[in-house]
Amino acid sequence: MRKLKLIWDFRGPDATRIAEHHEIHLKEYIQVEQLKITITGVETLSDIHTIAFLVVDESDMKPIRDALKPHRGQVYTE
């Protein structure tokens, strides 16, 4: 089954701090909804661009996308 990485972009001098905080909310959502998502994270792409993300099975993506409104997505490769 293909996995998709749902991504939220944060830009500016506080991007890393904001992305880290956003990941906390993603983990809370996973817990509240009792989802079997185990991959979340934060990646710093530059001094002013950091992303928060979670990885979902393609078959589970639509309701999660609609609820959380990520900025973009891509196919996840390990």
Image: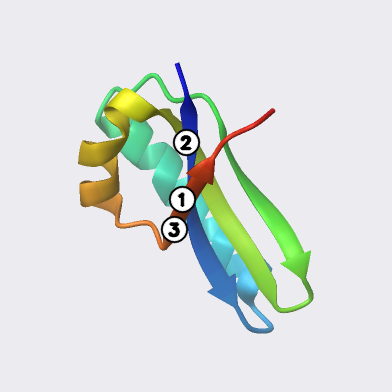
Q: Which residue lies under the disc numbered 2?
A: 4
Q: CA distance from mark 1 to mark 3?
A: 4 Å
Q: Residue at x 37, y 40 (%)?
A: 28
Label for residue 17? none
- Asked whether disc 1 touches disc 2, contact meaning CB atoms under 8 Å apart, the reply is yes
Looking at the image, is 41 positioned above or below residue 16? above
Q: CA distance from mark 3 to mark 2?
A: 10 Å
Q: Earlier in the sequence, mark 1 or mark 2?
A: 2
Q: Earlier in the sequence, mark 3 or mark 2?
A: 2
- Label 1 Cα neighbours within 10 Å, binned few <14 / some 14-19 / many ≥20: some
Q: Nearer the viewer, residue 10 or 2?
A: 2
Residue 71 placed where, x, y %?
41, 63
- Label 3 Cα neighbours within 10 Å, binned few <14 / some 14-19 / many ≥20: few
Looking at the image, is 33 positioned above or below residue 40? above
- Asked whether disc 1 touches disc 3, contact meaning CB atoms under 8 Å apart, the reply is yes
Q: Which residue lies under the disc numbered 3?
A: 72
Label for residue 73? 1
Q: Residue at x 58, y 35 (%)?
A: 76
Instruction: Judge from the rendering whether residue 65 lies leftward or rightward of residue 71; answer left or right.
Output: left
Amino acid at dot 2: Leu
> Does residue 45 appear in the picture of this structure?
yes
Q: CA distance from mark 1 to mark 2?
A: 7 Å
> Does residue 20 appear in the picture of this structure?
no
**Residue ranking furthest to the right:** 47
Quarter of the picture containing the N terminus is top left
Q: Nearer the viewer, residue 55 or 16?
A: 55
Amino acid at dot 3: Arg
Instruction: Judge from the rendering whether residue 51 lies leftward or rightward of residue 37; answer left or right.
Output: right
Q: Residue at x 22, y 49 (%)?
A: 67
